[in-house]
Each structure stands twice: as C-alpha cells, then as structure tokens.
Amino acid sequence: MTERKPLISGNWKMHHNHFQAIQMVQSLSYQLNNDDYSYCDVSVHPPFTDLRSIQTVLESDNIPISLGAQHCHEQEKGAFTGEVSTGMLEKLNVKLVIVGHSERREIFNETDSQVNAKIKAIFKHGMTPILCVGETIDERDAGDAETKIKNQLIEGLQGIGKDRVGKMVIAYEPIWAIGTGATATPADAQEMCAHVRNCILEISGKSPSESIRIQYGGSVKPVNIADLMMQNDIDGALVGGAALEAESFARLVQYRLQ
C-alpha cells in the first residue's frame, strides 16, 4: 500500500485582506513545529490580493507551508477581465490550485469541461490541482450521489495522464455540509472517499488510485477532524471557516495530538 502523507488545506474564500493574511500566517507558524510539518503537509489558499504578501512571508521566514490559490482561468492570457492565469500563479510560487469548488460550480456555473481545461493548465505550469467533487442534498436523497461524483471525475480527468492523476488531490465536499454546520459522519465520509478512490481505479488504474490523496471538505472542525482522519481513504481536509483563525487551523493540523 502506498504511503500517503496527509494534506490539510485552508480555503480562505473571500476573507482576510493582505494585512490580516500576514498576521494569520505568522501566528499559524508560531503554533506549528517541525513535527507537525513532518507528519502532514499544510497549504493556505488566500484571495488573489493576498498571494504576493503571503509568498513573501513564507519565503522570508522559511515557513514550510505551501501557498495555494482558490481558482484560475484555463487560458494563458487574453481579454478575460477579472481572471488570473496559471502562469501568473506559477510566478508567485503557488504550489496548489483548487479547481471545481462547489461554489464555483453552483454560483459561477463552472462546467466539468472548464474544470478539465483548468486542470491541464495547472499541470502545464508545474502546480498541483485540488479537484473538488460532491453532491447536493437533493442528489444525495435521490440516491444519485455516487453517479454525480463519478461523472465529475470522468469529465474532469479527460485526457489527464495516469502519472499526473496519481499526483493530484481530490477533495470530496458534500455540498449539503458546506457552511451549514452539518457534517457527514466519519463512516459517511469514508464511504464516499472510498467511492472516489474506486472511481480513480476504474479511470486511471491501480497505481494512481493508491497514490492520489483524497481530502474531506465539509464543515471540518477541531472537534471532528481526528475521527475523520482515522478513516482509511481520507488523506486530509479542505477546510473553510475553521481555517480562518490561526489557533483553530493549527489544531486541525495537529489532529494527531487530540
């Protein structure tokens, strides 16, 4: 069995100006130590306006936290007002890019085809995609959750080589649990993350399915992360609200101590 190092990622969404972002990362770095970083990888995904500031802090203080982005455009350049290309992110030493987040899909009508193009653009510039998949409460109640997620994976991974798939991160995020306070039970989360891994097995083969890291994202908090991380197919967490404060996010990274 391939050893998969956990990845705890903080998605700040539209929170923290660059002053607050600097304070947040510095405070977080004071609360984490080398043992924490050796046990799991950590990434923060601030708004675009914060990226350069956070890059400077991480690099000048030698903080072993990966800089991530929340979104990107699939084209290299062009008349796309308000968008940011993967080439621009690469120059900021961004390492991971979230793609296909449910809020991008639900609010901004991002399609599986666009998600696929963005994954290819992310890889082209040497970064790692965090591909988000998940179902709504209506889809879950109708028994369509597994089909929805499988289709998202099939469409999102079109034309992506097996070696690259194995290096990706998949974030299973039950849409019904994001920002609602509701959380899938550890057993529910494990069942769906195992389904994701089985889909990767069908799509790309055994080696990618064993090496790909699968995060759970859906109202992850310090009180529930340890139980979630005990599950066989959960290799980390994509965290929203609990990642906005240094103390709570540090507790998530240090889940093994709870």
Image (spheres, helix red, strand yellow):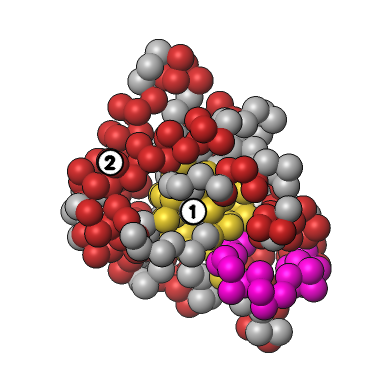
**Image location (x, y in percent) of residue 150:** 30, 35
Question: Toward the viewer: 247 or 1?
Answer: 1
Q: Give the image location of residue 100, x and y in percent.
A: 43, 44
Q: Amino acid at mark 2?
A: Cys
Say which quadrant the N terminus sits in. bottom left
Residue hosting label 1? 235
**For the residues bearing labels 1 and 2, Cβ distance under 8 angstroms:** no
Asked if the magenta segment contains residue 151, the reply would be no
Say what secondary structure mark 1 lies in. Answer: loop
Res 2 visible: yes
Majority SS type along the magenta span:
helix
- The residue sitting at 66% across, 65% down in the picture is 50
Residue 51 placement (x, y as % from top left): 61, 68
For the magenta stretch, what is the residue range? Answer: 24-48
Q: Dividing the picture into quarters, in which one does residue 59 lie?
A: bottom right
**Residue 244 coordinates in the image, percent (x, y):** 73, 52
Q: Residue at x 20, y 46 (%)?
A: 203
Q: Give the amino acid at mark 1.
A: Asp
- Residue that label 2 marks: 199
Residue 33 is one of the magenta-drawn residues: yes
